[in-house]
Image: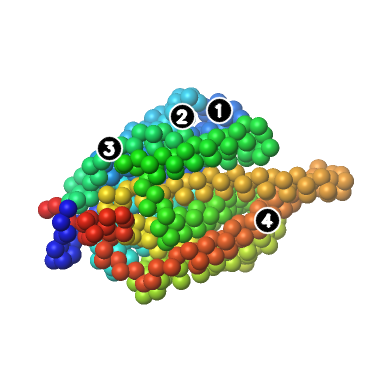
Amino acid sequence: MPKVPDHTVTHADPGRWKALVFIALAQLMVVLDATIVNIALPSAQQDLGISDGNRQWVITAYALAFGGLLLFGGRIADLWGRKRTFVVGLIGFAAASALGGAATGEAMMLGARALQGAFGALLAPAALSLLAVTFTDAKERAKAFGIYGAIAGGGGAVGLILGGFLTEYLNWRWTFFVNIPFAVVAAVGAYLVIREPAGGRNRSTLDIPGVILSTLGLVSLVYGFTRAESEGWSDAGTISLFAGSALLLIGFVATEARVKSPLLPLRVLTDRNRGGVYLSLGLAVISMFGLFLFLTYYLQVVKGYSPVMTGFAFLPMIVGMIVGSTQIGTRLMTRVPPRLLMAPGFLTAGLGMLLLTQLEIDTSYAGLILPAQLLLGLGMGTAFMPAMSLATLGVDPRDAGVASAMVNTSQQVGGAIGTALLNTIAASATTAYLVDNAAGATTPDAQKLLQLQGMVEGYTAAIWWAVGILVVSAAIAFALINTGKPDMGAVAGSGEGADDELKVPVVVH
């Protein structure tokens, strides 16, 4: 294909800022859905008669479908067109949410959650790749990714606030129904405003063996970590899932190296900078997801906060993320290399996490938890922002969907690992503390105090691990990401045969 003349660079999409509103709205809906149901779960479990053993499947069904189908969803966006995939994903997500809100039993609820995850896997990579090909000017791209990064990082905490409000003042069903207006507004807006860039479609055939191997491999991996949390790391089923996942993913890589039109072209992964982003971001998300869980339980069980108060207690983290992403990240992204934003960002978040290792039963919220959350938010917002942009920078337009899917995959897998790994560490530390100190607790009050101290002991033990993980994230970002100040005018052109590809996406008017 001939190169596009240079004058096309100035043909920016006139509706790009309106498009950003609808893309950001869809991303917020997907991210907050990962946490909004957590707060509503106890009420839903009681109403629908879900057993304690099956309760985790309300969360797991979403995570498995979402994490397992992301690469497939990303490639569908490349083949089918990003705008079309985005709109279909939104409509499907709204329908699945309506089904979840109207659920009359366990099977209907779990089916709705799996469908939400499947449509989310279509929607999320299409959203990020649309952003990547719509904003081609360096400064505008920095601003757009700043807003997107703040939502991607802070949406989970927004979910906790919204979930608390809806559960306490309305009904758990509204944690599902609330998605419908989000999805409808975003779908109508996207249909009217977003324009599909010319030359961005991938006309190759779908790699069916790659779809099967990657989906089964990722589902086995995510489920392996989920099972490890409930059954233990030495459980035969857990070990089988990890072994199966390793074999399937090795088979997937071998297949992708040989087929003519791979689901995930290995050039997307083997680029040093993109590989560094996927790895460091996935690790950072491990520590963040575990923290959301621990702080929610700490504030509600140990401190006695209501669901709404718990949600609001996460506000400093959201504020920190917005400031870090839209002010620090956006202003510095065109001036300094990405690793000088990502590595210090992860270290700043690590410092906030380090403060939380000092948690006690009577810890002051204003004295310790608030400043810790501000540092966490500032650090993660600053790091997320260049990471989101770098993950799709320099990617051939025909691979933008699948490159975007890899960012989401690293976040989803990181979230599943974080919840399982840190929960297991916390539970072991709590058990050890209770065994060591049981002799001294002779009265009911002393036993209750011992239980709370054991919980806090477990959380702080796991948070120490989260600190270590963030330090490793910073080291990976600093060592692997070696690109200089980004020339963000050219979104495409780093893959094989880049000389024959479109350097700048042209908007169809």
Q: Is residue 193 above or below residue 7?
A: above
Residue at the location (22% across, 55% down)? 501
Nearer to the camera, 160 or 475:
475
Q: Dot 1 corresponds to which residue? A: 50
Q: Earlier in the sequence, mark 4 or mark 2?
A: 2
Residue at the location (52% across, 62% down)? 476
Q: Secondary structure at mark 1?
A: loop
182 displayed left or right of 367: left
Q: Earlier in the sequence, mark 3 or mark 4?
A: 3
Residue 62 visible in the current orientation: no
Please state the horizontal and vertical placement of residue 229, each as a whole percent of the image: 62, 40
Q: Secondary structure at mark 3?
A: loop
The amino acid pointed to by label 3 is Thr
Residue 497 visible in the current orientation: yes
Q: Residues within 10 Å of mark 4 (few under 14, many from 20)?
A: many
Q: Earlier in the sequence, mark 1 or mark 2?
A: 1
The amino acid pointed to by label 4 is Thr
Q: Secondary structure at mark 4?
A: helix
Q: Earlier in the sequence, mark 3 or mark 1?
A: 1
Q: Dot 4 corresponds to which residue? A: 460
Q: Dot 2 corresponds to which residue? A: 109
Q: Dot 3 corresponds to which residue? A: 205
Image depth: mark 4 or mark 1 in front: 4
Looking at the image, do the residues carrying marks 4 and 2 touch, with CB atoms under 8 Å apart? no
Q: Could you tell me how far apart the alpha carbons at marks 4 and 1 are, in whole angstroms?
A: 31 Å
Q: Could you tell me how far apart the alpha carbons at marks 1 and 2 are, in whole angstroms?
A: 10 Å
